[in-house]
Structure formats: structure tokens, C-alpha cells
Image (tube, coloured by chain):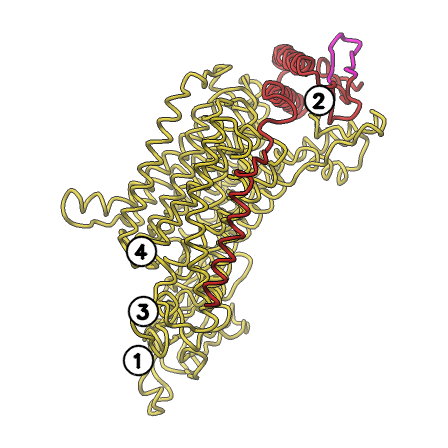
Chain colours: A yellow, B red
């Protein structure tokens, strides 16, 4: 009965095409019944995609190996969770999943706007349905999850071992939520261009959706880093892999938009730039999906198997770029700025530089990511660009951003005088310099790391001072105690203070990245009973003693587990159990690392090799020599902490403000800040 | 056979959902309750007032000299006033009751300094004093 899923996919294609045509034509001609048809189509496509997705999951749960997709990504012994996540385990299913999430957000936006933004909605529905129709074309004609094989294999090929991790249930959906959610701001941009209403209104609607997309994408990227850290087993969290880069591209432009949109809201400037950023961010999301799923660029995340869809994607991407550029050109006269940049010592200027840095970083990452394709086209040879290129370009850009994060909150809109700057910068600069001097005195001489910690101290001070000044002013004006004043301050200015919290998280993340400069690493071959010592940059001495090697069969795999006793500064610090896993179906061996976490550093242990694994399994050699790679990764926990704080800050900024109290309440008791109270402290 | 029946059922439900409004000419709302020009003016009013709020915030936070603050406040105050008047004019033109959806906010508050503040203000946008 799972074939009903294929029927649903075909119907979804037809309905998406029908609804897209109705939306655009209904909007253009002002015919309400056509617009209603388009909006209903959005709900119908969502329902049909839910049906198709349930059918795919049912096929996985029933181990229905008639289907090529199920046979390629599952086997009988695969756990229940991984069978459910089979929906997004491979290219085919993940395209359905992408469309499902987009249909979900599209339904949400239609529901949310059934009584407002009505001039925009026909085109919004038309745009999202066009994107959905494209995905349905790809799924139905080039990558059908219900493709039946000529014969039914007794068992499936199994899921890629690297995907057999609990992050599989968390990371891809979060990342895809981010990618798909960026379609909604794009749809509003298209609708603003088509309807000619390019005033502040579309941007205020778009901002919240962009923030939501940014939230998911940020979480998705951080989760991906966590997954890479525990699963890929090379000791790092970011490898500048094409698929990782793909997720970073829309994040960079999305972040730039979230800053530049403030300039449009406050000063009526950068209108065209904002439209271009919104459109570019969506196009980069499609590009990211194309990169991940086309298989044109080799990646450690090799999930793609069908390069035919690469050309369909490129065609769609090309059409979108041409159509977007044409729309912007058509409305080019509507983008006249209402104000001009009055001073380079202003928040506008700081945001402008911030935007340029983000977009430069995006171009640098894109250049490095697509260089293998470009080099193949020109020289006939794929030349991959490695981490040194990305680091050389992006570390300085990141440091500029870190500095701007400190400048932005301190500097005023329009114009700041040198005297103001002196007054507001003195303390943060002093703290930054003192941090640098202290670290230098304690032996930290790595230039980038030193600069990062100094700038982080500077920026964090500006953030703390902002909270302090705001709290103090509110406590003084309202007569509240400091804690209540702080809570009310954030509550009444969620966007501003949520943004500061995000900045604080970012600063902490940066410190975590800088910790890489002090990584300690050793690789040794040990016999049971032998030890290795490693010294952490924080001065701790870890002594690891290889005790024994054991093995046992587990569902879907055989595990070979090393037991390693750990002592920190001579005191017992537990047991680490790095593993090798031999998966039955794919005959692949993967490493499961052992990690001992502390607030400031991770002890990271990889079982790199076993001298006589066959002897161990056959019972001939119960005490094999094992090769271990031991790393001390300083400040890595700060990256996860910073990521958590960033997510928290985004939620604060995103959380809707309380609705204004209605007429029955006397004026003086009304909530002041939602309707902009004139002093919001 | 069951698949065929289910498919037919699914197709019928979907067709009823997406084709029926078109055939039956059931219409969707095409424009907001208030006209676009009014909504644009309202959005502009809100963003200008938010800019003024930020200015106050920056001043209270010690990021602006008094002279700078006063100069910017005057200019932004005029912009805010123009935005409020534009919004009110658009409201009047549209025949929409002033402050609809905004409680009884019809009464602007004129402070002793002469600045006309929007309804429900707790502080004067002109001089920053409590109303």
C-alpha cells in the first residue's frame, strides 16, 4: 500500500503547478477565487507530502526492499530510529523531506497571513508553490523514492555507518528547517517586487521569518559540528568540507541581512541591498542543497549518487537568478534611499562594513568550494582547496567581525563624535589590552589566538557594559531593583538585547575556535599495560594506560572496544572506551572516539588501529597492540556553550512581544513598549 | 484494486480542495482591511518611533553628547511627527477610526514642551520627560 506515496507525489506535482499558476495569475488580475485556489493548493501539497513521507517511512519500517531507495539505505537489523530517519538518509528521500518542510512553512505562512499582508499573499503562494513544483519535478522524474527494482534482494545495503549516530535524528532536520525557511523571506521579496510595495512593511514581516530560518540554520550548523566531532573521528569539528561550506553560505548572507535590515528600518537606506541579500540567501540555500545532493563535488558527506539531478538543479538555479535579477531591475527606481550615510563613525557604517565582511567571506568560501569544478572545467583536473586557504581568508575576516561586534553596540546611529567614542571605548579597550598583556605574560604568543582573546575581551566588555547601563538606567527611572530592571529591560527590548546575547555567544564560540592554536596531539602504539602521557595547554598532565581490548557482536555490527584508564595530574579520572565498529552490511569499519569533557578542554582518544584484529576475533590474540591518537582540544566545550547561547539569544529576539492591552484598560496602565514606547528602557 | 480506490479517493479530496474554490468562485480576501498606503504609513510610523526610542536608549546609555542628542532628536522628532501625520491622514482618508486595533489610542498627548506624542506614550518624544 506504500505505492500510495508515489500517487501522492504525482498529485503534489500537479497541485503545485496548478497552485503556482493560480497564485501569480490571481494576484496579477486581482481575482480572489484564483488566489483562494492557490492558498488551498499550499495546504493540499503539504497534505500530499505528508502522505508520501509516511509511505516512505512505512516502506523502511516494513523493510520493503522492492524499493531501490529502501534497499540502498536500510537493512533488516537496522534500528527503528535509523529506519525512520531513512526518510532523509539519501538523496532521494531528503529531497522529499526538503519539500515537506517547505510545504509546512508555506502552510504556516498562509495560515498566519489569512487576514493580513493580503496584497503579498497571492505572489507568496505562487512563489513557494513554484519552488515546490520544481522539487516535485526532481523527485518524480529524476530521483523517485518509489522506484521499484527488477528483483527483491533478501536484505538491504544498510545505512552509511557515519549516519548511524543519534545526531542523524537531529542535525539534518534542523539544517533543512533552516534552508527551507529561507524560502519564505524570498517569497515575500518576490511579492514585494511584483506588487510594487517595497516600503517598510514587507521587511518587517520578512525579518522574523529570516530570524527563524537563521535560528534553525545556526543550530543545524552547530549540531553538524558536534556530529563531526564525535563521529568522523579526526579530532576536529570543521573541515571546510564542501557540504559544511554549503550550509555556511546562506548563513553568512542571512546574518548580513539581519544586520542591514536594521538600517532600512531605522534609516530607509540599503533597500535594494536588502532585497538582494534575501534573494541571495535563498538562492544559496538551493545551491547548498544542490551541492549536498548533486554529487558533483566530492565530500566526506558523500550522500549523493545521482548526478543527473545536478543539471536540473543548475537549470532551476540559473532560472531563479535570471528571474530575480529581472525583477530587481524592473523595480530599480523604487529603491531610492531616504537618507544618506552621514558619518563613517556611525552604526550604519559599522553595519555596512559588517555586511561587506560577511559577503566577502561568502564569496571566499564559495570560490574555494566551487574551485574543483572550475579547475576541472578550465584545466581538466579537479583541484581541491584545503583548509589553509579558508583559514587564511576567513580568520582575518572573522577577527574584523569580532571587532565590529564590539563597535556596533557602542557606536550611535547617524553620527558619533570622537568624544563619545572615547567615553564608550575606553573601558572595553582597556580590558582588551589588559587581557592581551596578561595572556602574553602567561606565555600565549600565538598572534591570531592572542588577537582573538583580546578582541573577545573588548567585545564582551561592550556587551556587559550595555546590559549594565540599560539596567542601571531602568532601575533609576522605574525604581526597580537591578534584577527586575534587567528582566524588564530585556523583555521590553527583546530584539536589541537578544542580539547582544547572540553576540556574546558568538564571542565565546570564537574563543573556542582560537583554542585550536593550542591543540596537543600524540600518536602511539601500545601493548596492554603500557601508558602514554600528554600535557594540556592548561598545564594538566594526562596519563592514559591501555588496559585491554574486547569485542562483542551488537545489532548490525561488531564492536572492538579498547579500555583505557585515565589519570589527570596523578588522580584517577575514569575510563575511556574508544571503539572500532565493523558494520555487517557495508563491510566498513569506523571509529567511535572516546571523549572526556571538562569545562575548558576535551581529552579526545581515537582508536586508530588494532595490530591483529583478526587474531582478536578468532581468540588467538586477546592482547593485541593498538595504535591510539590522543588529543587535548582546549576550549572546544566553549564552542558548544557559545552555540547554545546564540540559540538562546535568537529565541529572545524572536519571541513575540506582548500584544497591546485593549481599550478597556486605562491609558496609563497600558503596556508601553510594543507600540514603540518612546523610552524603552 | 485497493490502491486504485485509494488513489481515486486522494485525487478527489485534493481536487475538491484546490479546484472547487475556483469553480464555485469562492473568493479570498485580496487586500487588507486597511489600504496598503495606510499600512505603509503605519509601518513607517512604527519604525520612526522605534528609531527615536533607540536614540533615547543611546543617549541614556551615554553614547551621545547632549548637543548631538538634541540635534538628532529634533530631526528625528520631525520625521516621527511627519510619519504620525501621514498615518493619521491615511487613516482619515480610508475612513478608518483612528487607533482601531490599538485600543482607545485616539488621543495624542501634547506635552508642555509642545511636542505631540502618539497615544499611549509614557515619555515625551520631544524632551524625554515622563508624561
- Report which residue position mark 4 lands on: A299
Q: CA distance from mark 2 to mark 4?
A: 53 Å
Mark earlier in primary sequence (1, 3): 3
In the displayed structure, would residue A61 be above or below residue A477?
below
Classify mark 1: helix, strand or loop: loop
Q: Which chain's residue wears label 1?
A: A
- Report which residue position mark 2 lands on: A678
Q: Where residue A194 sits: x, y (%)?
A: 45, 26
Q: Where residue A307 sits: x, y (%)?
A: 27, 54
Classify mark 4: helix, strand or loop: loop
- The label nearer to you, 4 versus 3, is 3
Q: CA distance from mark 1 to mark 4?
A: 29 Å
Please report the residue visible at 57 percent of the width from the left and 26 percent of the height from the top.
A201
Q: CA distance from mark 2 to mark 3?
A: 67 Å
Please report the residue visible at 54 percent of the width from the left and 73 percent of the height from the top.
A574
Nearer to me, A3 or A565:
A3
Classify mark 2: helix, strand or loop: loop
Mark earlier in primary sequence (2, 4): 4
A257 to the left or right of A527: right
Magenta stretch bounds:
B107-118
Please report the residue visible at 42 percent of the width from the left and 40 percent of the height from the top.
A130
Please report the residue visible at 43 percent of the width from the left and 73 percent of the height from the top.
A63
Asked if labels 2 and 4 share a chain, the reply is: yes
In the displayed structure, would residue A237 be above or below residue A501?
below
Asked if labels 1 and 3 share a chain, the reply is: yes
Classify mark 3: helix, strand or loop: loop
- Report which residue position mark 1 lands on: A611
- Mark seen at residue A444: none
Amino acid at each position: 500500500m506504500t505505492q500510495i506515496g508515489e500517487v501522492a507525489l504525482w498529485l503534489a506535482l500537479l497541485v503545485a503547478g496548478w497552485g503556482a499558476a493560480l497564485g501569480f495569475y490571481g494576484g496579477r488580475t486581482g481575482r480572489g477565487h484564483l488566489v483562494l485556489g492557490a492558498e488551498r493548493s499550499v495546504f493540499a501539497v503539504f497534505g500530499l507530502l505528508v502522505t508520501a513521507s509516511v509511505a516512505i517511512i512505512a516502506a523502511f519500517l516494513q523493510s520493503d526492499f522492492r524499493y531501490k531507495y529502501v534497499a540502498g539505505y536500510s537493512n533488516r537489523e537496522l534500528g527503528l530510529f535509523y529506519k525512520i530517519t531513512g526518510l532523509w538518509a539519501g538523496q532521494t528521500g531528503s529531497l522529499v523531506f526538503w519539500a515537506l518542510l517547505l510545504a509546512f512553512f508555506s502552510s504556516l505562512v498562509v495560515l498566519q497571513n489569512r487576514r493580513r499582508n493580503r496584497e503579498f499573499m497571492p505572489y507568496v503562494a505562487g512563489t513557494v508553490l513554484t519552488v515546490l513544483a520544481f522539487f516535485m519535478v526532481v523527485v518524480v522524474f529524476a530521483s523517485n523514492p518509489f522506484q521499484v527494482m527488477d528483483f527483491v534482494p533478501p536484505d538491504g545495503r544498510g545505512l552509511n555507518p557515519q549516519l548511524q549516530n543519534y545526531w542523524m535524528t537531529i542535525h539534518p532536520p534542523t539544517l533543512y528547517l533552516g534552508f527551507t525557511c529561507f524560502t519564505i523571506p524570498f517569497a515575500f521579496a518576490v511579492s514585494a517586487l511584483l506588487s510594487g510595495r517595497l516600503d517598510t512593511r514587507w521587511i518587517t514581516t520578512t525579518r522574523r521569518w529570516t530570524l527563524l530560518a537563521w535560528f534553525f540554520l545556526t543550530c543545524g550548523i552547530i549540531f553538524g559540528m558536534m556530529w563531526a566531532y564525535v563521529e568522523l573521528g579526526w579530532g576536529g569539528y570543521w573541515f571546510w568540507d564542501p557540504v559544511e561550506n554549503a550550509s555556511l553560505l546562506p548563513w553568512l548572507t542571512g546574518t548580513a541581512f539581519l544586520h542591514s535590515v536594521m538600517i532600512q528600518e531605522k534609516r530607509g537606506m540599503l533597500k535594494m541591498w536588502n532585497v538582494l541579500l534575501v534573494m541571495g540567501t535563498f538562492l544559496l540555500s538551493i545551491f547548498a542543497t544542490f551541492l549536498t545532493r548533486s554529487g558533483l563535488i566530492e565530500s566526506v558527506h558523500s550522500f549523493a549518487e545521482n548526478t543527473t539531478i545536478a543539471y536540473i538543479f543548475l537549470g532551476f538555479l540559473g532560472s531563479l537568478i535570471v528571474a530575480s535579477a529581472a525583477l530587481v531591475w524592473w523595480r530599480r527606481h523604487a529603491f531610492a534611499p531616504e537618507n544618506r550615510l552621514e558619518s563613517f563613525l556611525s552604526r550604519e557604517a559599522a553595519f555596512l562594513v559588517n555586511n561587506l565582511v560577511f559577503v566577502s567571506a561568502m564569496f571566499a568560501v564559495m570560490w574555494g568550494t566551487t574551485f574543483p569544478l572550475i579547475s576541472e572545467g578550465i584545466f581538466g583536473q579537479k583541484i581541491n582547496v584545503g583548509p589553509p586557504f579558508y583559514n587564511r581568508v576567513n580568520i582575518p575576516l572573522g577577527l574584523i567581525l569580532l571587532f565590529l561586534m564590539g563597535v556596533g553596540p557602542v557606536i550611535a546611529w547617524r553620527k558619533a563624535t570622537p568624544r563619545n567614542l572615547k567615553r564608550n571605548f575606553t573601558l572595553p579597550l582597556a580590558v582588551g589590552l589588559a587581557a592581551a598583556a596578561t595572556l602574553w605574560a602567561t606565555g600565549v604568543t600565538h598572534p591570531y589566538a592572542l588577537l582573538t582573546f583580546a578582541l573577545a575581551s573588548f567585545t564582551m566588555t561592550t556587551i556587559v557594559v550595555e546590559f549594565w547601563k540599560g539596567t542601571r538606567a531602568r532601575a533609576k527611572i522605574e525604581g526597580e531593583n537591578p534584577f527586575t530592571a534587567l528582566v524588564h529591560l530585556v523583555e521590553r527590548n527583546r530584539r536589541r538585547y537578544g542580539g547582544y546575547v547572540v553576540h556574546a555567544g558568538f564571542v565565546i564560540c570564537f574563543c573556542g575556535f582560537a583554542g585550536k592554536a593550542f591543540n596537543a596531539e600524540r600518536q602511539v602504539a601500545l601493548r596492554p599495560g603500557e601508558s602514554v602521557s600528554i600535557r594540556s595547554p592548561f598545564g594538566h598532565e594526562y596519563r592514559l594506560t591501555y588496559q585491554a581490548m574486547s569485542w562483542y557482536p551488537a545489532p548490525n555490527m561488531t564492536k572492538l572496544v579498547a579500555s583505557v584508564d585515565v589519570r589527570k595530574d596523578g588522580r584517577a579520572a575514569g575510563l575511556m572506551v574508544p571503539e572500532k565498529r565493523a558494520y555487517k552490511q557495508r563491510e566498513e569499519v569506523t571509529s567511535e572516539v572516546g571523549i572526556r569533557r571538562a569545562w575548558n578542554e576535551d581529552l579526545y582518544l581515537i582508536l586508530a588501529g588494532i595490530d591483529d584484529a583478526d587474531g582478536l576475533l578468532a581468540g588467538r590474540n586477546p592482547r593485541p597492540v593498538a595504535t591510539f591518537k590522543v588529543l587535548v582540544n582546549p576550549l572546544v566545550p566553549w564552542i558548544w556553550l557559545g552555540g547554545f547561547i546564540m540559540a538562546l539569544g535568537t529565541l529572545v529576539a524572536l519571541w513575540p512581544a506582548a500584544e497591546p492591552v485593549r481599550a478597556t484598560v486605562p491609558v496609563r496602565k497600558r503596556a508601553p513598549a510594543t507600540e514603540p514606547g518612546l523610552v524603552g528602557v | 484494486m485497493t490502491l486504485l480506490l485509494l488513489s481515486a479517493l486522494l485525487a478527489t479530496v485534493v481536487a475538491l480542495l484546490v479546484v472547487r474554490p475556483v469553480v464555485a468562485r469562492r473568493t479570498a480576501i485580496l487586500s487588507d482591511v486597511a489600504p496598503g498606503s495606510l499600512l505603509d504609513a503605519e509601518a513607517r510610523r512604527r519604525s520612526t518611533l522605534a528609531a527615536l526610542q533607540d536614540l533615547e536608549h543611546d543617549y541614556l546609555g551615554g553614547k551621545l553628547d547632549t548637543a548631538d542628542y538634541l540635534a538628532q532628536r529634533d530631526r528625528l522628532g520631525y520625521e516621527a511627527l511627519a510619519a504620525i501625520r501621514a498615518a493619521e491622514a491615511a487613516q482619515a482618508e480610508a475612513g478608518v477610526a483612528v487607533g482601531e486595533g490599538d485600543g482607545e489610542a485616539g488621543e495624542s498627548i501634547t506635552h508642555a514642551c509642545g511636542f505631540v506624542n502618539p497615544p499611549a506614550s509614557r515619555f515625551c518624544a520631544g524632551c524625554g520627560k515622563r508624561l
